Image: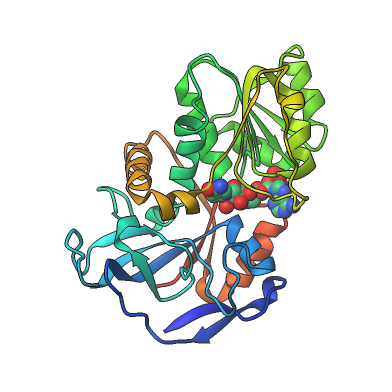
């Protein structure tokens, strides 16, 4: 089968098309004939430095849509040929992907395989950030960095549905502002100056919930933008800075909380909970309440170009690789 392989860490050029063996499902697993593979920022990190995929060579790809090809021993709730979307811990940039049955989801009625490929990573992540981990309540305000990206686009819409609290976004360029405003954000700040812009918008109060995919020193600075009893949820380290340590001295006076979220940890440790969160989140897309536009679709062989696009920080919404002919 055709697949994209990383044999050495590096730039987009290390994503090389290869011919490789079709995987066979083991106990509790299925294989999927992949129609589309979603492109995620985490795959860029894996390609650059091996984030959660330290062993070379590997095929990146956290999410696919397609049809069930074969069932491993013990899998009883899926059938061959069924249209599915799957969250996997890697291997999605390929004609056939191997997935644990626990994180394979029948495509909700009315959704295409193309739309289904956008769901498995972003939808449960965004849902968890706003609801299960962020616990956003009606009337509370939220600020989201990377507001026009895959996760940010869905987070804005979910936050907007919670109630009448302000939904603020941060993006790196003015070209992304309109896109974010169309996806749930009330106000969008551009560039590194966002703290000052937020302070002006909130009369210096700050926000109740801050969702941070950047990490490091920038996460520490974010604390200054929290209202009393505010919460910050970190869900990435796009800034690639060294981890920052929080202590009671910084958090105590504002009674602030810091939380982290990882869908990979949720999938590995609590797959049943991931299924439940995913079911809730997918339903919102099937009902038309949430929309994640595909803004770039490239053939599998052009995975390197998809990574170049995402790394350029110019993309909005979701990027997909088209795998089936
Ligand atoms: N913890 C989890 O479970 C989980 C799950 C899914 C995704 N994530 C994280 O959520 C974030 C969004 O993921 P996504 O797949 O939806 O990607 P995405 O948002 O579509 O694209 C990456 C975004 O990161 C922002 N960014 C900030 N610093 C960057 C840098 N140094 N280089 C490139 N981009 C940078 C860019 O927005 P601006 O240019 O506007 O800043 C860009 O929109 C990522 O940090 C990812 O690791 C975490």
> Residue 257 lies in what quarter of the image?
top right
In this view, the residue in front, 154 or 204, is: 204
* Number of marks in picture: 0
**In the image, is residue 322 above or below residue 283?**
below
Residue 263 location (% of width, % of height): 48, 49
In this view, the residue in front, 274 or 315, is: 274
The colour mode here is: rainbow
In this view, the residue in front, 215 or 178, is: 215
- Answer whether residue 209 is visible to the viewer in this image: no
Residue 204 location (% of width, % of height): 77, 14
Please give the name of the residue rendered at 60% of the width and 70% of the height, measured from the top-left corner. Answer: 54
Residue 298 location (% of width, % of height): 54, 67
Please give the name of the residue rendered at 73% of the width and 24% of the height, measured from the top-left corner. Answer: 225
Residue 305 location (% of width, % of height): 64, 69
- Toward the front, the furthest residue is 248
**In the image, is residue 175 above or below residue 320?**
above
Give the quadrant of the N terminus: bottom left
- Answer whether residue 261 is visible to the viewer in this image: yes
188 relative position to 61: left or right: right
**In the image, is residue 241 above or below residue 307?**
above
Please give the name of the residue rendered at 72% of the width and 26% of the height, measured from the top-left corner. Answer: 248
Please give the name of the residue rendered at 70% of the width and 50% of the height, measured from the top-left corner. Answer: 238
110 relative position to 124: left or right: left
- Toward the top, the furthest residue is 203
């Amino acid at each position: 089968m055709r697949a994209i392989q990383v044999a050495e860490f590096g730039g987009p050029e290390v994503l090389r098309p290869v011919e490789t063996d079709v995987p066979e499902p083991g106990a509790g697993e299925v294989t999927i004939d992949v129609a589309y593979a979603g492109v995620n920022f985490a795959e860029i990190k894996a390609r650059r430095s091996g984030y959660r995929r330290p062993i070379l060579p590997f095929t990146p790809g956290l999410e696919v849509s397609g049809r069930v090809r074969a069932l491993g021993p013990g899998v009883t709730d899926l059938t061959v040929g069924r249209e599915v979307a799957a969250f996997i811990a890697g291997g999605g940039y390929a004609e056939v992907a191997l997935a644990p049955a626990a994180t394979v989801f029948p495509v909700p009625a009315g959704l295409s395989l193309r739309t289904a490929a956008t769901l498995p990573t972003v939808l449960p992540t965004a849902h968890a950030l706003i609801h299960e981990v962020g616990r956003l309540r009606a009337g509370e305000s939220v600020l989201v960095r990377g507001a026009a990206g895959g996760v940010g686009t869905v987070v804005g819409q979910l936050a907007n549905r919670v109630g009448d609290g302000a939904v603020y976004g941060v993006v790196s360029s003015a070209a992304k502002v309109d896109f974010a405003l169309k996806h749930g954000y009330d106000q969008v700040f551009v560039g590194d100056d966002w703290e000052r812009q937020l302070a002006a918008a909130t009369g210096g109060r700050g926000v109740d919930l801050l969702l941070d995919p950047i990490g490091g020193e920038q996460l520490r600075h974010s604390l200054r933008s929290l209202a009393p009893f505010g919460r910050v949820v970190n869900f990435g380290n796009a800034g690639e800075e060294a981890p920052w340590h929080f202590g009671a001295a910084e958090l105590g006076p504002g009674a602030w909380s810091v939380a982290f979220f990882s869908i990979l940890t949720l999938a590995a440790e609590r797959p049943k909970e991931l299924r439940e969160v995913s079911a809730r989140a997918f339903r919102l897309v099937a009902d038309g309440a949430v929309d994640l536009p595909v803004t770039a679709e490239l053939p599998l062989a052009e995975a390197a170009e998809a990574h170049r696009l995402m790394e350029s920080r110019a993309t909005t919404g979701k990027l997909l690789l088209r795998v089936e002919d």
